[in-house]
Amino acid sequence: MKCNIPHLVLILAAFAVVPDSWAADTAGGNVFLDAKIGSAFGKQNGSNYSHQGTHSSWGADGGYLWKLDDQRSAGFELGYLHFDQFYEQSGNSGSDRTSATSAISLGGHFQVLFGDDRATIFQLRGGLMSVKMDDHFTSNFPSSSGTNSWRQTGLYAGLGIGRKLTQGLSVILAYSYYGAPDNANGLGTDLNLNWVGLVAEYQF
């Protein structure tokens, strides 16, 4: 995970130096790209999870927004989010589990601009997602270890509020929820994950 943070810093820096002339305020709409860094937390099948090591989570989105009027835009997005590793220890069974979790998503994206300068942004997002689980387990009673990998499909939803720094670049404080019922392996792995972080978005 730590090796990815410098890459995201470079992406954010690239957004900041893109000429504003690229951010065309056309009547049709705008392509948008974003990079995001934050923290993930949640529950799986009623068991509390916490991060092992770093608490960081990262991802990226891209899509297109059609202008509904001078203040509102609506469109679609395709995204990826890596939740990092979740860790659980059970004192009763003497077992440890580490789960690396990531999600790809496809959904709708809605934005509203507020204020006299129309520089304050409110976002709503939501749609379908697929979560990939790589579950590494170790048990002492009896002694065993192994890895299970599978995908679960579900829904995601999010909101955010932020500010335009330039015509094309915005910084947004965002929250997203990712929910996936046990529809893959019958092991009771219901996912209820939350993500909170900062998003740097560029429209052009």
Image (cartoon, rainbow, N blue to C red):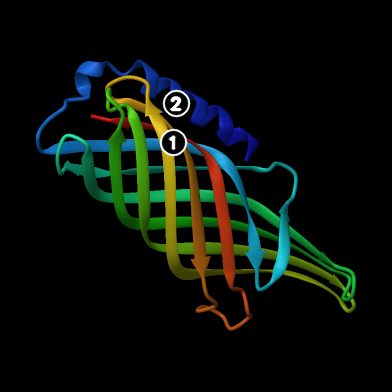
User: Which residue: 10% across, 38% down?
Assistant: 28
**Is residue 151 toward the left or the right of residue 167 in the image?**
right
Q: Position of residue 177 (x, y in %)?
A: 50, 57
Mark 2 belongs to which amino acid? Leu
Disc 2 designates what residue?
12
Q: Quadrant of residue 160?
A: top left
Up the image or down, 124 lies above or below 150; here it is above
Mark 1 belongs to which amino acid? Ala
Q: Are marks 1 and 2 in contact (CB under 8 Å)?
A: yes
Q: Position of residue 70 (x, y in %)?
A: 16, 34
The residue sitting at the bottom extreme is 186
Q: Quadrant of residue 155?
A: bottom left
Up the image or down, 86 lies above or below 179; here it is above
Disc 1 designates what residue?
35
Separation of disc 1 and disc 2 at Cα? Answer: 7 Å
Q: Position of residue 48 (x, y in %)?
A: 73, 63
Return the residue nearer the eye: 191 or 174.
174
Q: Classify mark 1: residues with Cα within 10 Å, few (<14), some (14-19) or many (20+).
A: many
